[in-house]
Image (tube, helix red, strand yellow):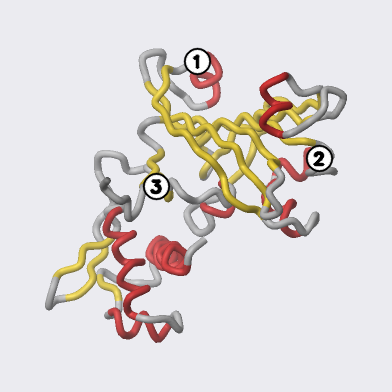
């Protein structure tokens, strides 16, 4: 994660925990607080402006905007981040997990190709409902190779698999390829995301890699249309 995104996330956590009033300190003060340059702070503030959290008024200051009345429970994250839901939600609410199903099986042909596995190797097949302050937030379908990520248990799944990978297996998480699409709801969405039959969901398909290049996760995350948003920053127009 880049420095300015880390700072933006930290400022957002402080805003949500009400460490600031209606207004943030100026860029110079923030730069000193985070031991960085005003350029980095400026980029971090642009992230929060894009997320409709801050409003910068030239000559006046940096103001905290009121929460959106249209989607008051919306959780917005960078489309480039893939540090795990638990990590990205730090300071934004209490995260709990409901394990819908957990199995160890042989991979299908698509999974073998993407995860670089043989037909006789095993994968975890996990479906989790993630709740934010007790309310359905996300529905996650995850496939991971057992040989790459050994030792996943129900206890691990109730907490954070990504934290387990970092802190217990001491592996570094690298890049991920993502495809984000709108999709019609299915029966699981209705049961575990409180969706109506005519609602839509935001589906994120991901293939994630460790820093050493090994693929370790195929996943699909499904969000209610009114509770999640993904933002792209600094997109080049070609």
Mark sitting earlier along the chain (3/2): 3
Query: What residue is drawn where x is 35% and y is 34%?
Result: 226
Mark sitting earlier along the chain (3/1): 3
Picture coordinates of residue 228, whole percent (x, y): 41, 39
- For label 3, the crowd category at 10 Å Cα-Cα, with few meaning under 14, some 14 to 19 and many 20 or more, is some
Mark sitting earlier along the chain (1/2): 2
Say which mark, if any, is on residue 76.
3
Looking at the rendered structure, the secondary structure element under dot 2 is loop
Q: Which residue is mark 1?
A: 186
Q: Which residue is mark 2?
A: 153
Indicate the quadrant where residue 46 lies: bottom left
Looking at the rendered structure, the secondary structure element under dot 3 is strand
What distance separates the C-alpha of mark 3 from that of mark 2?
Answer: 29 Å
> Mark 3 touching mark 1, by CB under 8 A?
no
Apparent side of residue 220 relative to residue 156 in the rendered image (left or right)? left
What distance separates the C-alpha of mark 1 from that of mark 2?
Answer: 28 Å
């Amino acid at each position: 994660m880049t420095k300015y995104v880390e700072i933006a996330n930290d400022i957002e956590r402080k805003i949500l925990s009400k460490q600031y009033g209606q207004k943030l300190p100026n860029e110079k003060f923030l730069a000193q607080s985070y031991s960085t340059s005003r350029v980095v702070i400026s980029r971090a503030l642009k992230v929060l402006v894009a997320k409709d959290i801050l409003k910068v008024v030239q000559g006046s200051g940096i103001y905290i905007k009121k929460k959106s009345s249209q989607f008051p429970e919306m959780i917005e994250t960078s489309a480039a981040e893939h540090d795990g839901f638990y990590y990205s939600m730090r300071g934004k609410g209490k995260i709990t997990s409901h394990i819908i199903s957990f199995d160890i099986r042989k991979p299908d042909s698509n999974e073998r190709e993407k995860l670089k596995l043989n037909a006789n190797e095993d994968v975890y097949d996990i479906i989790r409902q993630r709740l934010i302050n007790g309310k359905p937030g996300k529905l996650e379908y995850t496939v991971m190779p057992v040989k790459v990520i050994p030792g996943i248990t129900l206890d691990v799944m109730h907490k954070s698999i990504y934290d387990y990978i970092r802190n217990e297996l001491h592996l570094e998480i690298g890049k991920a390829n993502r495809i984000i699409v709108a999709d019609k709801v299915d029966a699981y969405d209705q049961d575990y995301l409180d969706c109506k039959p005519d609602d839509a969901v935001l589906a994120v398909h991901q293939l994630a890699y460790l820093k050493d290049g090994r693929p370790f996760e195929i996943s699909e995350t499904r969000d209610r249309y009114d509770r999640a948003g993904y933002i792209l920053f600094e997109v080049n127009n070609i």
